[in-house]
Image (tube, grey):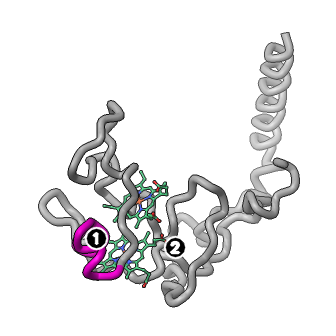
Amino acid sequence: MKTKIKAIALALALALGLSFTALGVVAAEVQALRHSGAAEPDQAPGIYKVTEGAKLERAYRQQPPLVPHPTDKYEIDVKVNQCLRCHEWPYSDQEKAPKISDLHYIDRNGVRQDTVNGNRYFCKQCHVPQNDAKPLVENKFQAATTNTNIR
Ligand code: HEC
Ligand code: HEC
């Protein structure tokens, strides 16, 4: 029953929103993230420098750790993965790099393999170089360590 009420409320809100947009009331306030008109060339994005020599904290327990070094020169494709030459054991010992955790070796059936599994092969899907980029959109996100609402 509750879900039904929610659904009706949502439908109403949508319908109202749409009619306002049609009247141009809401549309005037909408601003595209690219900050330029559709026909103008895009502004060049800001230059972000990787924060090195420091470790930014994880915002929540399951977060893939940020990369504290540049990654643009390391090739990752079906033939080569240069991240592995430092982060996979035994190279990790030689390079004094943190070893990839065991979860990276588990396939989708939960079976432990001896090589990094395909579902964790493309490292940059999850690990991004750290920098102090400001949020694109104003938001209320808080790290789990400081968010008192979830305790
Ligand atoms: C030349 C060796 C080398 C290569 C290649 C390399 N790394 Fe690293 N990486 C390190 C070292 C050493 C550290 C430890 C921190 C430091 O000294 O910068 C590190 C730290 C990290 C961390 C932080 C781990 C943690 O527990 O906080 C991540 C994530 C990471 N690297 C991901 C990558 C990815 C993704 C690639 C490929 C795009 C890559 N690294 C390529 C040497 C390397
Ligand atoms: C699907 C997302 C995903 C991909 C892809 C992925 N990782 Fe991770 N990685 C994580 C998560 C989540 C953690 C933290 C929890 C854990 O240990 O699994 C992590 C942890 C790590 C750590 C820290 C281990 C530790 O014990 O502190 C390193 C180093 C690392 N990954 C390297 C890599 C490298 C190199 C690749 C590419 C071969 C890669 N990861 C691909 C999600 C990913």
Check disc 2 and report its element: helix, strand or loop: loop
The magenta span reads 83-96
Mark 1 and mark 2: span between their CA atoms?
Answer: 39 Å
Give the percent coordinates (x, y) of residue 58.
62, 66
Rendered view: 11 above or below 104:
above
Which one is in front, 51 or 19? 51
Mark 2 closeness class: few <14, some 14–19, many ≥20 residues within 10 Å: few
Which residue sits at x=47%, y=80%? 68
Check disc 1 and report its element: helix, strand or loop: loop
Give the percent coordinates (x, y) of residue 42.
50, 74
The residue under label 2 is 40
Would you say residue 20 sits in the magenta stretch?
no
The residue under label 1 is 83
Q: Nearer the viewer, mark 1 or mark 2?
A: 1
Q: As drawn, is 62 to the left or to the right of 148? A: left
Indicate which disc residue 148 carries: none
Name the dominant secondary structure of the magenta segment.
helix
Mark 1 Cβ and ligand 1 under 8 Å apart? yes
